[in-house]
Image: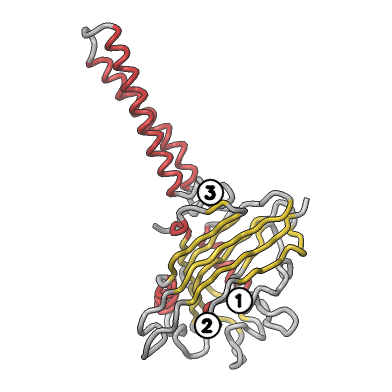
């Protein structure tokens, strides 16, 4: 399924009305079929049919709501538009933002580690959170859980967070290597191949698990971006400038959280296959286990 301009979450109440209408029609049909029959027994039978059909419709609608992510009240549904953009457009915006961040000596790019204050370089009603990338750490053994304590920097009330969990990025601007394609189709194929390696994904917000994580996979088309002078992917070759890219992975847009302290625990693994990094055996699984601590202001 691809992004559309329609908020599929808004489809649920319409489906509910349609299925309930179908239930009423079925009930009337049952009543007409029973005319001239068994008096009060016929009325009771009609009521049973009505309740059973409506219950069945409600169950189907509830299942649809879960599939669309509507049960995750802290997360924007996958196919909803938020602040005028689709998920895919927000993911493109995230990668344009993170590639423009200089990988300086005081504040490293957030794709390197999580020491950069979450407030630096943020603006507007949606802030971005980047997970240290497997591009830089795939050969690190062992992969240890990380606590990213950002609680000292207060996030303004009413601010949403685009949470980039496990994801991949491919660009023709990258230095020569496994991630470097030569065409737009190659950018999408490489990003998709490594996103296919993601397993065991989980997200827990304040001890409440997010369900149906697989529904939050987002693959972009080709997009343009500008790379910082000390581009995080361009060192030590000192590559920078403008380029094209594609991204793929799992992204959640968190609705504004209440005032106070919050814990977002998420992770998963990249399970690499032979040939992913050239000849020879693949590296061990790259495991991600992040505990993000944040504070939302009044």
Q: Are marks 1 and 2 in contact (CB under 8 Å)?
A: no
Give how far across and how far down residue 34 sits, in percent.
Answer: 23, 13
Disc 2: CA contacts within 10 A as few (<14), some (14-19) or many (>=20): few
Can you tell which mark lies on residue 192?
none
Left or right of 41, for residue 122: right
Is the residue under label 3 in contact with that under label 2 (CB below 8 Å)?
Answer: no
Q: Nearer the viewer, residue 261 or 132?
A: 261
- Give the percent coordinates (x, y) of residue 102: 68, 81
Say what secondary structure mark 3 lies in. loop
Residue 23, horizontal then vertical, whole percent: 34, 27
Sequence-earlier tag: 1 or 2: 1
Residue 111: assigned label = 1
| Quarter of the picture holding the N terminus | bottom left
- Judge whether 171 appears above or below 42 on screen: below
Which residue, given by chain and number where applicable, does mark 2 sit on? 141
> What residue do we see at 51% from left, 51% from top?
77
Callout 2 secondary element: loop
Of 191 and 3, nearer the camera is: 191
**Distance CA(mark 1)–CA(mark 2):** 18 Å
- Coordinates of residue 39 in the picture (x, y in percent): 27, 6
Pointer 3: what residue? 72
């Amino acid at each position: 399924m691809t992004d559309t301009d329609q908020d599929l979450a808004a489809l649920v109440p319409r489906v509910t009305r349609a299925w309930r209408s179908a239930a009423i029609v079925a009930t009337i049909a049952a009543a007409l079929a029973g005319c001239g029959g068994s008096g009060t027994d016929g009325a009771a039978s009609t009521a049973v049919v009505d309740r059973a059909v409506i219950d069945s419709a409600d169950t189907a609608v509830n299942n649809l709501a879960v599939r669309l992510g509507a049960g995750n009240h802290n997360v924007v549904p996958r196919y909803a538009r938020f602040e005028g953009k689709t998920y895919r457009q927000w993911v493109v915006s995230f990668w344009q933002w993170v590639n423009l961040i200089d990988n300086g000596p005081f504040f490293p790019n957030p794709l390197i580690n999580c020491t950069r204050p979450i407030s630096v370089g943020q603006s507007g009603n949606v802030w971005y959170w980047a997970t240290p990338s497997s591009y830089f750490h795939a050969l690190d053994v062992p992969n240890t859980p990380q606590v990213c304590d950002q609680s000292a920097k207060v996030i303004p009330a009413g601010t949403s967070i685009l949470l980039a969990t496990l994801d991949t990025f491919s660009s023709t601007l990258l230095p020569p290597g496994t991630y470097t394609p030569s065409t737009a189709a190659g950018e999408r194929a490489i990003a998709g191949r490594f996103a296919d390696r993601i397993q065991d994904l989980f997200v827990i917000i304040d001890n409440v698990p997010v369900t149906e994580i697989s529904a939050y996979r987002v693959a972009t088309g080709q997009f343009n971006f500008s790379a910082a002078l000390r581009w995080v992917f361009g060192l030590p070759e000192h590559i920078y400038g403008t380029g094209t890219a594609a991204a793929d992975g799992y992204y959640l847009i968190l609705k504004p959280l209440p005032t106070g302290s919050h814990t977002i625990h998420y992770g998963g693994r990249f399970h690499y296959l032979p040939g992913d990094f050239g000849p020879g055996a693949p590296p061990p699984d790259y495991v991600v286990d992040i505990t993000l601590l944040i504070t939302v202001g009044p």
